Every structure is written in structure tokens, then in C-alpha cells.
Image (spheres, helix red, strand yellow):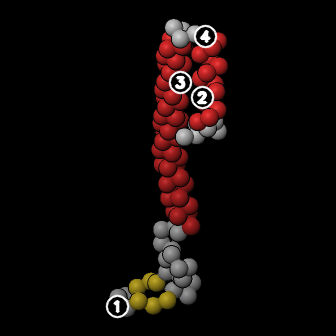
């Protein structure tokens, strides 16, 4: 058993010293108070972690739509309507509907 780097022999020594200092009547009360304090610290830690997770999710939700808009705008400006995506010249149809390359 190793709690915060303190092994069983060290914990027994600490318990014995506390028993001598505070007495057998006061020791259970101190133990309860210490346990309540540790529990409240754990609850506060969980609440803080949950709040951080909520804030991170909200930030991620706010960034995603902005990134999608930026990506859509960059795609739209890179490939204007009427220009093929591969950079080739547009093909114009002649009167007989056979496609020919536009030389102009």
C-alpha cells in the first residue's frame, strides 16, 4: 500500500504520533473532518474538469463552422464558376453541338 509516496510503516508511525498528540477521543473526529475535506476537494476537481471540458467543446463547435466557411470560401475562389477544376480552358459547343476547344 503506497499512498502519496508514504508506505505502510510510515503511515503507522504517523497514526501513532497523531494518537499520542490528539488522544483517542479526538482522532475519529479529525479523521471525519479530513475525509470530508478530501471529498470536497475531489468534487471541486471534478466540477472544474467538467467545466473545462464543456468550454473546450463549445470552443470546438465555434471553430468548426468558421473553418468550414473558410474552406468553402477558399474552394469557391480557387474554382470560379465556368472554369474547370483542373485549370483547362472551358469547352464551347459549336452550332452542330460538337465540342471544340475554345481558342480565344
First reached walking from the N terminus: tag 2 or tag 1: 2
Quadrant of the rendered structure where residue 93 is? Answer: bottom left
First reached walking from the N terminus: tag 2 or tag 3: 2
Give the number of the mark in front: 1 or 4.
Answer: 4
Give the number of the mark in front: 4 or 3.
Answer: 4
Say what secondary structure mark 4 lies in. Answer: helix
Residue at which label 4 appears: 22
Say what secondary structure mark 3 lies in. Answer: helix
Image: 69 above or below 39: below
In the image, 24: left or right of 94? right
Residue 51 visible in the snapshot: no
Q: Mark 4, residues whose alpha carbon is within 10 Å: few (<14), some, or many (≥20)?
A: few
- At horizontal 57% and vertical 84% (from top left) the residue drawn is 104
First reached walking from the N terminus: tag 1 or tag 4: 4
- The x and y percentages for residue 54 are 47, 36
How much space separates mark 2 and mark 3, taking CA atoms?
20 Å
Residue at which label 3 appears: 38
Residue at which label 1 appears: 96
First reached walking from the N terminus: tag 4 or tag 3: 4
Observer-nearest of 7 and 77: 7
- The x and y percentages for residue 15 are 59, 23
Q: Are marks 4 and 3 in contact (CB under 8 Å)?
A: no
- The x and y percentages for residue 85 are 51, 75
Q: Mark 1, residues whose alpha carbon is within 10 Å: few (<14), some, or many (≥20)?
A: few
First reached walking from the N terminus: tag 2 or tag 4: 2
Quadrant of the rendered structure where residue 34 is? Answer: top right
How much space separates mark 2 and mark 1, taking CA atoms?
101 Å
Say what secondary structure mark 2 lies in. Answer: helix
Observer-nearest of 21 and 84: 21
Amino acid at each position: 500500500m503506497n499512498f502519496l509516496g508514504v508506505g505502510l510503516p510510515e503511515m503507522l508511525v504517523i497514526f501513532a504520533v497523531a494518537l499520542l498528540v490528539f488522544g483517542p477521543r479526538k482522532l475519529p473526529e479529525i479523521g471525519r473532518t479530513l475525509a470530508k475535506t478530501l471529498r470536497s476537494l475531489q468534487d471541486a476537481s471534478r466540477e472544474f474538469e467538467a467545466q473545462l471540458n464543456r468550454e473546450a467543446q463549445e470552443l470546438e463547435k465555434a471553430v468548426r463552422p468558421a473553418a468550414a466557411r473558410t474552406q468553402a470560401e477558399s474552394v469557391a475562389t480557387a474554382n470560379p464558376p465556368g472554369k474547370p477544376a483542373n485549370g483547362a480552358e472551358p469547352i464551347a459547343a459549336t452550332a452542330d453541338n460538337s465540342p471544340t476547344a475554345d481558342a480565344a
